[in-house]
Image (spheres, grey):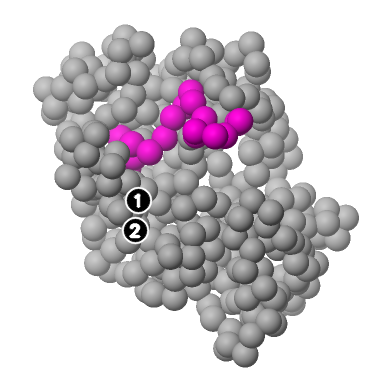
Amino acid sequence: MRVASLSTCLTLLGAFAVPALAQDVPLFASDEVLRFTVVAPLDDIFDHRDQENVEYPGIIIVDAGTELDTLEVDIRTRGRSRLDNSICRFPPLRLDFPKSRVAGSVFEGQDKLKLVTHCRDDDRYEQDVIKEALVYRFFNELTDVSFRVRVARITYDDTASDNDPRTRYGFLIEDEEAAAERNGWRYIATPNVAPDYADPEHLALLEVFQYMIGNADFSAFSADPGSEECCHNTKPIGEFSGPIFALPYDFDITGFVDARYADRLFRGNLQRLGVRNIQDRRFRGLCMSEEHWEPVFRRMVDRRDAIEGIIRDQEGLEDDTREDALEYIGEFYEMLEDPESARKTFLDECIPT
């Protein structure tokens, strides 16, 4: 394999994307930061942080420019690690909209949405959540077969306490069934995925992308222990008979995001992988033939300017956070431009099937 010869490779049209078939929805039609207010009994909602999470009614007031849209919504907590009060005082939320009442608003066509919140009232945590949203947008640049997100500036008005409203960045994530439909597939509820059923081009792209962002906390094939649905930090869409595409999500435990709690949560895995901290990259992809790697590298190189542009243009990033983010991505591209480094990373360190 010669990474330096990427410019001579054939561009494989359509190798990384399936034509979007479903009609687009307004929420994810723009990258402009969305501004809205959540009015709900948040203290009561936060008291329920287990598998029996209770929904509470609330309203969302959307700043639509010249007017305000007021929408009914049911809200509950969600998540795993970030549901732990010792990690996140302000946990992730699930928003459940009555479809019949969101017509004409930015939430038209939405039903259930994941809201990734700022975790704690600390500017450092807020920077982490903005960086995590960027990771989703990086993958959007590489393939349509990915979860779309919308960064939001959210004011939280807690009707169950006397606390003043707080305003923080967060982001909304496309539902897995909506993402599947948009790409002409369906979401697959299954305990595991056999590697032979995975689309090889998409899998190669996914695994190189995960290396780019410094993520070893995922699986495209296996569920978490105790879970009945595949897979660990990826969602399978496609057909049961194949092909199956893994949509990655949950990027707080990555070198790029470097969440404040990441090293503590991932310490045992770091030791097993032989890396010192969460920012050290380790490739966790399957071994494939070189014909699958070359077009992936070409795609990554072609999208470098766009990926770095996403970082430069993102509202809310502090200057030092922006510089660190660009440096981390730049280190990946320096490796990719060195044929020997690329060979060692993607051929010598891959996992045999």
Quarter holding the N terminus?
top left
Is residue 79 visible to the viewer in this orientation of the structure?
A: yes
Q: Is residue 129 left or right of residue 186?
A: left
Q: Are marks 2 and 1 in contact (CB under 8 Å)?
A: yes
Place residue 320 in its image quadrant.
bottom left
Residue ID at (64%, 51%): 51
- Which residue bears the numbered disc 2? 261
Residue ID at (75%, 67%): 56
Overall secondary structure of the magenta section: loop
Is 119 located above or below residue 175 in the figure? below
Q: Which residue sits furthest right?
A: 100
- Which residue bears the numbered disc 1? 265
Q: Is residue 138 left or right of residue 68?
A: left
Q: Amino acid at mark 2?
A: Tyr
For the residue pair 175 and 34, the one nearer the viewer reads as 175
Is 119 part of what is drawn in magenta?
A: no
